[in-house]
Image (spheres, rainbow, N blue to C red):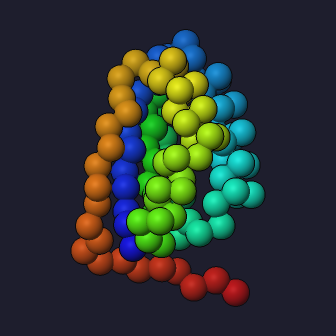
Amino acid sequence: MIHLQVTYRIRSNRIEEAEREIAAFSATLQSNHPRFANYRIFRHADDPANLVHIISFRDREAQLEHTQSPHVRRFVENMLALCEYGPVYTDLTEVASRVAMTG
């Protein structure tokens, strides 16, 4: 499993625009990347301009498929125009986890 964290800060006057980009991107991910183990986008509770993506890929092939896809490249380009800083990419190594059971 491959885990990645992406952090960035949106310009305060562009937050609504970024939210629209994220919503469209999220919908595209659901239909085009079934091999994701996990893709979650968070914002800081006290500062909506700070965003964090936590992505888990099943394998390197899934990660390459993601990073090389046209919609990801378009999303990154669009978001860069809205950023005050970032993105900052950090590879993560899982130390422990707990997954809640549903159902």
Q: Find residue 85 and report its horizontal and vertical position in percent.
A: 35, 23
- Using residue 43 as the reference point, say whether residue 89 is left or right of it: left
Residue shown at the point (57%, 25%) measured from the top left: 78
Quadrant holding the N terminus = bottom left
Q: Find residue 101 and report its horizontal and vertical position in percent.
A: 57, 85
- Using residue 32 as the reference point, say whether residue 40 is left or right of it: left
Q: Nearer the viewer, residue 73 or 55?
A: 73
Quadrant holding the C terminus = bottom right
- Please say whether residue 100 is visible from this viewpoint: yes
Q: Find residue 10 and report its horizontal and vertical position in percent.
A: 47, 24
Which of the 4 image quadrants contains residue 21?
top right
Up-down: is 35 above or below 50? below
- Please say whether residue 47 is visible from this viewpoint: no
Residue shown at the point (32%, 43%) measured from the top left: 89
- Using residue 103 as the reference point, say whether residue 74 is left or right of it: left
Residue shown at the point (72%, 39%) measured from the top left: 24
Up-down: is 58 above or below 49? below
Which of the 4 image quadrants contains residue 95?
bottom left
Q: Nearer the viewer, residue 55 or 96?
A: 55
Which of the 4 image quadrants contains residue 16?
top right
Q: Find residue 70 and report its horizontal and vertical position in percent.
A: 62, 40
Q: Nearer the viewer, residue 91 or 51?
A: 91
Residue shown at the point (41%, 27%) measured from the top left: 9
Of all residues, the one furthest to the top in this rendering is: 13
